[in-house]
Image (tube, rainbow, N blue to C red):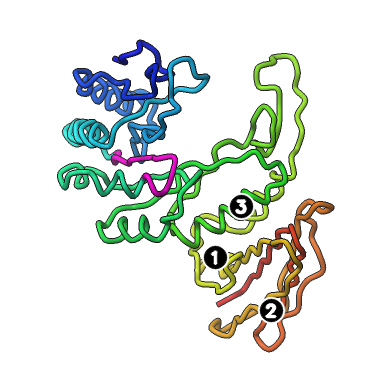
Amino acid sequence: MTISQSATGEKNGNDNLAPEHYAAFADYLVAVVQHFKKDWGVQFDSLEPLNEPDGHWWKYGNHQEGCYFEQSSQDALLAVVGQRLKASGSKTILSAPDSNSIDNAVSAYRSFSQATKALISRINTHSYGGSQRKALYELALADHKGLWMSEYGDGDASGMDLAHRIVEDIRGLKPTAWVFWQVVDGGGGWGCLSAPLNNDTDTSYTVNKKYYAYESFTRFIRPGSRFIGIDDTDSIAAYDHNRGTLAIVLVGTKADRQESVDLSKFARLPKSAELYRTSRAEDLVHLDALPITNRTLTVTVPAQSIVSVSMNEVW
């Protein structure tokens, strides 16, 4: 179905899926969704036909699969896939455009026809680049679409770049899912764990600091939680009303700082909060509990550290 006869891309990084095969490609994708449901009982929540279609770097001979699509081509293909998916009676929704850059996701979605937009139930974007988080959030909100940050990764083994990006995306995009590119990778700091992926006999692996940086969020912010407002731009807070738990993750910058967290809007609070810290010398170390005084929590955030605060019986 590709112009170059390769899944690695077109020779010059241009459109690679031949237009005469759009319908066949759409039927193939829908058939895969139906096969998983019928034969294995797996119901896909969403179908995303494109991976970083804004990337001209998807050229023939790459080591990753990819396919560039002009925005008009994205519009045309998504329309066909959406129609085929709807006609199949599947509960799986269509998501797009899955751009590499947030700004490109804004541009692509705005370029789609109203008919294509009507077929898309969720906007997906990667956050490797771009800054128009608020704009994309407002687009999704205005059109009653879901919004996912569907891929991010970086080569910083310390996890600090990852931590800052999580906070930036959660505060700006307000997505209902934030998806990490890979937990395990072959090296270079991209994964939480580094392992020889192409060696059947070598079972060794290295735990990067990034593992604990990521755990600083995932261990405390659990499914069912709702993000709530916090003024500090390097922090996020999440509250689980059903369990009465409050989690706050504060990410350090270049200098030490102290944050006073006002908890006065909660009717009931514990006497203290659990405190965990990841830094150059610490791997999610459980520190002494922090007292809550006058309905205020004062947290010290050392430079280049991640501090996780956990509270129970918060109502």
Q: Amino acid at mark 2?
A: Leu
Tell me the SS state at disc 1: strand
- What percent of the width, then of the height, locates residue 306? 70, 59
Say if residue 89 shows up in the picture.
no
> What's the magenta region?
92-104
Residue 216 relative to residue 229: left or right: right
Give the residue drawn at x 51%, y 55%.
223
Decide: few, some or many residues near mark 1? Use Cα within 10 Å; few <14, some 14-19, many ≥20. Answer: many
Q: Amino acid at mark 1?
A: Ala
- Residue at far top of view: 5
Res 297 label: 2
Query: Residue drawn at (77%, 65%), measured in percent from left and top?
Result: 302
Where's residue 261, x and y in %? 64, 78
Please tell me which residue lies in front, 304 or 150. 304
Q: Give SS at disc 2.
A: strand
Q: Earlier in the sequence, mark 2 or mark 3?
A: 3
Q: Is residue 226 above or below residue 88?
A: below
Q: Which residue is mark 3?
A: 218
Q: Residue 131 in the image: state x and y as whole percent.
A: 45, 54
Q: State the CA–CA distance, disc 2 to disc 1.
A: 15 Å
- What residue sits right under mark 1 in the picture? 238
Which quadrant does the C terminus fall into? bottom right
